[in-house]
Every structure is written in C-alpha cells, then in structure tokens.
Image (spheres, grey):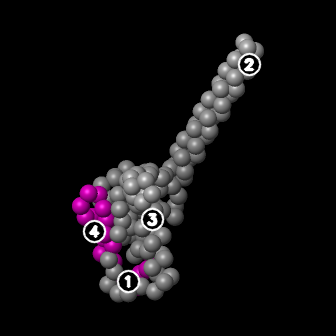
Amino acid sequence: EPEEIAQLRAHAEACRAEKQAQKEQAEAAHAAEIERLRTDPEYAHLEQGSDQSGVLAGKNIRRLLKAALPNHKFRVRKTSYGSVSISCDAPLDDTEHQTVSDIRKRFRSGFYDDVTDCHSKSRSPWQEVFGSAEYVF
C-alpha cells in the first residue's frame, strides 16, 4: 500500500538522520577530548604530535614511566614495524607492573582478534595527541 510505503520511507529517513546525528556527536566529543588533552597542564611535560611510527610514543612513555616510577630505570626502544619495547632494570611488584601496563595501553593502537583472526587499529584522542605504536611490549 502507498501509505505503508510512505511510513517505511519516513521511518528509514528518521533512522538515517538519527545515525548521522550520533556520528556527528561522537566526532564532536572526540575533537573536544583532543583539545582538552592538548591544553591540560597535567600533560604539559609530554610532547605532542600525530606520530604513528612509535618514536613520539616512545618518548612520552619514557617520560610517564620516569614520573610514575622514579626509582626504576626503563629502556624504551622503537623496534620494527612501529612497535615499542619497554624493559626495566629490576623486577617490578604487582602495583608497579600495573602502572607500567596502564601507561603502555594508552599508546597501543594495534590489536589482534583471536576470534576473527584479524588485526585492527584504533585511534584514541590520547594517541592522536601524544603518539601511538602498533604494539607496545
């Protein structure tokens, strides 16, 4: 019936408009978070840029680790394919290990999904401002 077709078209257009509004809202929130991170005085000691090769991420990881765990010496090195490797001079207790893990996760942009057997990437506002690496070991 023509009336039913008109209702379905109207519903489809409303769904399309809602989806577009949600997308625009997510993009605006992403941009606002990027701007907040760029101007946040808590992170003023970190370098900013949009480096995905791991160089900038390595520098910022080193700075965060030094600030969080000043009694340990860390080696942060860019390895092949945009990866970053972290090593420590002494064993870490559980709390320190969790601190390192939390810092590491901020910069990691590559993920491997065992279920789908696929590799994927993500770009968080943090990574867009302070750099990222495919993998951070």
Outermost residue, top direction?
2
In primary-sequence order, the first of circles 2 and 3 is 2
What number is the disc on residue 72?
1
Confirm whether residue 63 shows in the render.
yes
Front position among marks 1 and 4: 4
Residue 74 belongs to the span the image colors magenta: yes
Q: Dot 3 surroundings within 10 Å: few (below 14), some, or many (20 or more)?
A: few
Disc 1 to disc 4, C-alpha distance? 16 Å
**Residue carrying label 2:** 4
Contact check, label 2 and label 3, Cβ < 8 Å: no
Q: Within 10 angstroms of label 1, few (less than 14), some, or many (20 or more) residues? A: some
Q: Are discs 4 and 2 less than 8 Å apart at CB? A: no
Q: Secondary structure at mark 3?
A: helix
Quadrant where the C terminus is found in the figure:
bottom left
Q: Earlier in the sequence, mark 4 or mark 2?
A: 2
Label 2 neighbourhood size at 10 Å, few (<14), some (14-19), many (20+)?
few
Hey, what amino acid is under mark 3? Answer: Lys
- Give the residue at mark 4: 77
Query: Which amino acid does the dot numbered 1 rest on?
Result: His
Task: Look at the image and say whether residue 93 sits in the magenta stretch.
Answer: no
**Which of the two residues, 99 or 44, is positioned nearer the viewer here?**
99
The image quarter in which residue 58 lies: bottom left
Q: Earlier in the sequence, mark 4 or mark 3?
A: 4
